[in-house]
Image: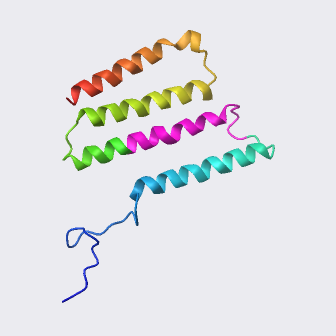
Amino acid sequence: MGENTSHGRPPGQTGSTGGPGGGNAIWIGVALIVLGGIFLAQNAGIEVLGVENLWALLLLIPALGSLVNAWTIYQNRGYVFTSEVGSRIGGGVFLIVLAGFFLLDLSFSAFWPVFLIVGGLVALLSAIGS
């Protein structure tokens, strides 16, 4: 009898993500390293990206995590769009828009209707998946 090295996966299927957390943990790790490098360079007086509100990049970590999570759920449910997938996409888009406001130094007083539009899209995506 041979040794089972599939770790709970069907025979012939290998895991390319290498450990608990899988691919999500890898992308979060890469994002944190890149952001740390950007902030370190900025603190050392090196202008990075010519943007003052670089802290807003931190909003992109949960945004991308939400979008990756939505994709994972979508795949695991047999490529069926559910309300859970829609709400996670909506949450990710909301955080990306919010980060964009800070990174581009946009005026909330002029562009606040964008948040109504994003809120409507979140509600629509959640309803479509129901």
> In the drawing, does residue 123 fall left or right of residue 104?
left
Residue bounds of the magenta highlight? 48-68
Q: Is residue 38 on the magenta stretch?
A: no
Q: Position of residue 106 (x, y in %)?
A: 60, 19
Q: Residue furthest bottom?
A: 1
Q: Is residue 62 on the magenta stretch?
A: yes
The residue positioned 46% from the left and 16% from the top of the image is 114
The residue positioned 67% from the left and 51% from the top of the image is 37
Q: Position of residue 16 (x, y in %)?
A: 36, 65
The quadrant where residue 129 appears:
top left
The residue positioned 39% from the left and 59% from the top of the image is 22
Q: Position of residue 17 (x, y in %)?
A: 39, 63
- For the image, the number of numbered tags is 0
> In the drawing, does residue 69 fall left or right of residue 80?
right
> In the drawing, does residue 90 fall left or right of residue 57?
left
Q: Residue furthest top?
A: 110
Q: Is residue 7 above or below residue 17?
A: below
In this view, the residue in front, 19 or 93, is 19
Q: Residue furthest right?
A: 45
- Which quadrant would the C terminus be assigned to in this image? top left
Q: Position of residue 33 (x, y in %)?
A: 60, 53
Q: Is residue 59 above or below residue 117?
A: below
Q: How is the image coloured?
A: rainbow
Magenta highlight: main SS? helix
- Which quadrant would the N terminus be assigned to in this image? bottom left
The residue positioned 33% from the left and 31% from the top of the image is 87
